[in-house]
Image: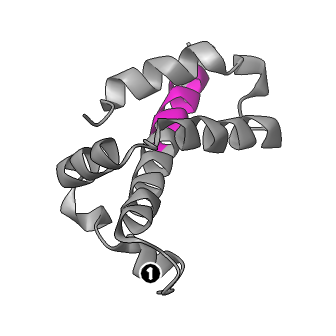
Amino acid sequence: MLTPYQEIKEFIAREIDTDDYGTDAADDRIRELADYEVPIYYSEIIDEWREMPMEYSNRYFQEIGVDDDFTITQLMQIDLSIYYLDLFEMAYSELQDELAEGEDD
């Protein structure tokens, strides 16, 4: 089951100190957190890949090209990595905007 966006956003809010927002450390942590969301077991990879929005399917072609050394589940895992990284970055950006709005009030 794919991790819902709201859950990702709440996770980021707990895991990253707002003082670090906008820094390289926070960006690195976002990548790390997104990587942790990607399943490692074949059945979970396949299930989540099926649930993932179609625009993320076969993104490995665009991102890294085709290599005969990858299995289909590894390619699916790459698609999921791209998907989760996009979601984590979107949620993080939204949290930064909310924090900035709160400071302006």
Q: Find residue 40 and report its horizontal and vertical position in percent.
A: 46, 44
Q: Residue at x 32, y 73 (%)?
A: 58
| Residue 91 within the segment the image draws in magenta | yes
Badge 1: few (under 14), some or many (20 or more) residues near its Cα, within 10 Å? few
Q: Residue at x 56, y 43 (%)?
A: 35
Image quarter of the N terminus: top left
| Residue 30 within the segment the image draws in magenta | no
Q: Find residue 94 and report its horizontal and vertical position in percent.
A: 47, 33
Q: Is residue 43 left or right of residue 17?
A: left
Secondary structure under tag 1 reads: helix
Q: Residue at x 63, y 18 (%)?
A: 15
Image: 77 above or below 20:
below
Q: Which residue is mark 1?
A: 62
Image: 91 above or below 80:
above
Nearest the eye: 26 or 62: 62
Dominant SS of magenta comes to: helix
Q: Describe the colour scheme in one phrase.
A: one colour
Q: Which residues are magenta?
A: 90-100
Q: Residue at x 80, y 43 (%)?
A: 24
Image quarter of the C terminus: top right
Image: 61 above or below 40:
below
Q: Find residue 22 and report its horizontal and vertical position in percent.
A: 73, 37
Image: 13 above or below 62:
above
Nearest the eye: 21 or 48: 48
Nearest the eye: 45 or 27: 45
**Number of numbered tags placed on the structure image:** 1
Q: Quadrant of residue 39?
A: top left
Q: Find residue 63 and report its horizontal and vertical position in percent.
A: 51, 76
Q: Quadrant of residue 100?
A: top right
Q: Amino acid at mark 1?
A: Gln
